[in-house]
Amino acid sequence: MMFGNLMIPGLIAVGVFLVSLICTCVILNLAPILGLVKSPTNRCSHVMPTPRGGGVSFVVSSLIAFSILYFSGSISGPVIPVILAGGTLIAALGFWDDLHNVPVRYRLVAQAAIVAASVYALSPLPALEFWGFNLNVSWFTWGIATFALIWWLNLYNFMDGIDGLAGGEATSILVAATLLISLKTASFEATEQILMLLLTVALLGFMALNWPPAKIFMGDVGSTYLGYMLGMLALTSLCSGSLNLWVWLIIPAVFWVDATFTLLRRMIRRDCWYQAHQSHAYQRLSRFLEETRPGSHTRHRAHRKVSLGMLCINIGWLFPLSVVALYWPAWGLLTVAAAWTPLVLLAASCGAGKPGNIEQRHQKHSKNVEFQEGVSLEV
C-alpha cells in the first residue's frame, strides 16, 4: 500500500526532520563526554576541534521512519528489512570506528560480509546489458554488485572531508533519483522514492549544523551509512526497473570520478591508499581557494564554494545527462563518457592523487628518519 494522502507523508517528513535536528544538537553537546571530538591534524581540512558522529542523527531518524512505515503496512518490499538490518549494522560499525579507530582490515571484512549478505537478499539481480549483449549470470552479477557497493561505501567515507560536501552530495543524489523515477513512472509512490525522500529530510536536519562553517561532522557512522543506503537504494531501483545502471553511473559522478581517479593515481605512485590524505581533487581545490583569498573565514568560504560548485555540477551537468540516459539507455555508455570526461580532466588539472605540500614534507621526513636509522645501524 502506498500513500494516497499527502498530509500523512508530510507530517512524517516534518517529524523526521525535527528528530534529526534535535539528535544533532544532542550529539553536539554530548560529543566531549563520549570522546567524539576530532582534533585537527596535518591530514584533515579543519583547524578547530570539532565534534563528529553527527551522522547518528539521520541514521536514527531515517531508520525509525522506515520501521514505522514498514510495520504499519504503509510501504512494502523485500528491501525494507534488508536495509533496516544492514543499515543498522553498518552504522554501528561506523560509530564504533569513530570511537575506537577499528583497523582497516577488520572494518573491510565486516563491511564485505554485511554488503554481500544484503546484495544476496535482493537476488535475483537484473541482468547486465551492454550493446545488446545480455549477461545474466547470477553469481557474476552478485559479485559485481557486492564489489561495487563495497567500493562505493568506502568511497563515500573518503569523500567526507570538508564541510557540507558528503551531505550535500547525498541530498542531490536522492532528490535527482526521486525526480527521475517520477519521470519514468509518473508518480511519487514507489517504495524507493519514499525511502529516498525520508532519508533526504533526515539529512537536512543534520545539514543545518554541518553546512560551512560546520559545527559538527557526520563521522564514519554517517558517511558509511549514506554510502550503504545510496547503494542499496540504487540496487533496488535497478531491480524494479525504475532506473537503469547508466543513471547511477552519472548522478554521483563527482564522487565516482574524484575518489577513483585519486585512488588509482595513489596506487600507481605506491602510496598507502587507505591512509588519510589530502590529495582528492576537492581537497586540493579547497586549499587553492584558501590560498588565493586569505582571511579569518577563508577556510569556511572555500568549503562553501567547493560544496556549492559540486551541487552546480550535479544540477546543471549531470542531471540533464541522467535524463538522457534514462530515456535513451542505448546511448548510456556514450552519455556516461560525456558525463565523466570533464570531471576526469578537472580531477587531473587539480592534481588529484598527488601529494600536497604537507604530505611531501611528511614523506621527506620519513625518508630522512629511515636514512638516519640506516646510518646509525651501519656505524
Image (tube, rainbow, N blue to C red):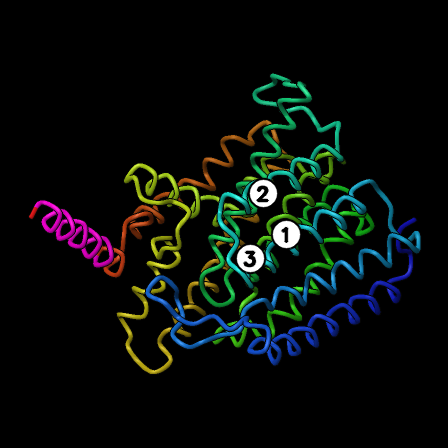
Residue at horizontal 16%, vertical 51%? 373
**Is 301 rendered above or below residue 80?**
below
Task: Give the secondary structure at mark 1.
Answer: helix
Give yes or no for residue 74 being in the magenta stretch.
no
Please provide percent x and percent y for residue 165: 50, 61
Between 177 and 184, the one nearer to me in the picture: 177
Sequence-first tag of 2 and 3: 3
Sequence-first tag of 1 and 2: 1
Q: Is residue 144 left or right of residue 81?
A: left
Please provide percent x and percent y for residue 50: 49, 74
Q: What amino acid is at disc 3? A: Asp
Spatial CA distance of label 1 from label 2 is 9 Å
Eye-nearest disc, 1 or 3: 3
Please provide percent x and percent y for residue 323: 61, 43
> Would you identify the image quadrant in which residue 59 lies?
bottom right
Q: Which residues are magenta?
A: 361-378
| Residue 322, label in figure | 2
Q: Residues within 10 Å of mark 3 (few under 14, many from 20)?
A: some
| Residue 97, label in figure | 3
Q: Main secondary structure of the magenta part?
A: helix
State if disc 2 and disc 1 touch (CB < 8 Å).
yes
Residue at horizontal 66%, vertical 22%? 139
Q: What amino acid is at disc 1? A: Ala
Spatial CA distance of label 1 from label 3 is 31 Å
State if disc 3 and disc 1 touch (CB < 8 Å).
no
Location of mark 1 (residue): 176
Please provide percent x and percent y for residue 106: 54, 45
**Is 270 rendered above or below residue 307?**
above
Q: Residues within 10 Å of mark 1 (few under 14, many from 20)?
A: many
Eye-nearest disc, 2 or 3: 3
